[in-house]
Image (tube, rainbow, N blue to C red):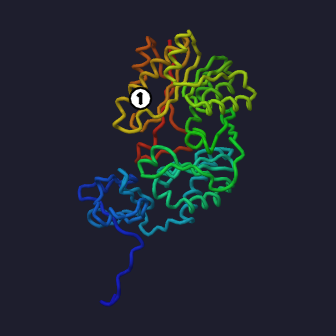
Amino acid sequence: MSPDTDPPTRAHPVVRLRPKAEARAIRHGFPWVYADELVTDRRTQGLAPGALAVLEDAERHELGLVTVNTQSRIIARMLDRDPAAVIDRAWFAARLARALALRQRLFDAPFYRLIHAEADGLPGVIIDRFGDAAVIQPNAAWAEAHLAALAAALAEVTGVATIVKNGSGRARGLEGLAEETLLLTGTLAGPVPVAMNGAVYMADLMGGQKTGLYYDQRPNHAFAARLAGGGRVLDVFSHVGGFALACLAAGATSALAVDASAPALALAAEGAAAMGQGASLATRQGDAFAAMEALAAEGAAFDLVVCDPPAFAPAKPALVAGLRAYERVALLAAKLVAPGGYLGLCSCSHAADLAAFRSACARGIGRAGRRGQLIFTGGAGPDHPMLPQLAESAYLKALFFRLD
């Protein structure tokens, strides 16, 4: 290169780890850089949320291509180990095709989680598939900025005709993103029926919680169904009847679904009717804690009680209060289990690990005056893969007990 020749222009700016930051974890697959690990000079602070940058360690060795959001505690997310990667429709298509190959091997019908964020190589992105429709949750600023290319690649790879953007939830707030749910392509005539574990669920892709259905509980629904034959079932925090409908499909004599959302319970009833089990499902709308206390006062007892509450401990500051809430759920639910019956308790809290959750459940069962055998420990289904380097990607815990 002659003295008069300009050096090659970088496609992206450079961001650099602080000298004491652990670059080894990044090299070994950890996908996040926290705000206190990155040099945040004026140039870095000036990057727009979701901007792409080349990440270097303190010795200026390139680590890969990242997306940067200085408004977030997770200031950088690894997108590609190749610093020269081009994030375009073809790049998205390659990631989607890899994810699709796994799901097609796992399931014989196109109803599953297609993209599980970092574990599928798309940080902060959730995509659930409902046959000819899909719901994208762009929970990180970079995904919001590249949504058009992502949606185009999704249609190309899967052939779905309807794509919904679900821009709601706590994660978007942490990224500084506004809430917005809209139809990107195609049409929706109403809730989508989803056959799963012998049951029929009605998924509201535009107005329901999250993407409209919780695919992660599929294997735990199946285990609960094994306990339900000929029994009375109580499904607390039921959403659209996740455990209740699976148990009815397996031969439960009756099921009561309890949830705070009247629309969710209406969808549960619609699903039961579609299964020919409309007369076997009852619903009770209201606060779950109050409902369990009322059922105990009424002298109600069930052969199987399952509680699947929202995340009581979504982050470490909420851990202590969250574990107390899980303990209270176990206490109230255990009182409603008939002798020799079964109790299922679930947590989707990132901050509460399995040991802490199990201890909280055991305390609650003990405080209820019951003795329990732990017979099953479950997690999310295989369409929700775990990134081994990221504990947060294995968030779901399900414990089933037999109570004396």
Q: Secondary structure at mark 1?
A: helix
Residue named by callout 1: 357
Q: Is residue 386 left or right of residue 304?
A: left
Q: Amino acid at mark 1?
A: Phe
Q: Is residue 360 left or right of residue 155?
A: left
The residue drawn where x is 41% and y is 56% is 77
* Depth order, front residue of 43/10: 43
Residue 285 versus residue 132 in the image, above or below = above
The residue drawn where x is 45% and y is 59% is 79
Instruction: Please indicate, yes or no, whether residue 307 appears anywhere in the rendered image.
Output: yes
Residue 200 versus residue 281 in the image, above or below = below
The residue drawn where x is 51% and y is 26% is 376
Residue 351: quarter of image: top left
* Depth order, front residue of 155/72: 72
Residue 131 versus residue 153 in the image, above or below = above
Q: Residue furthest left?
A: 20
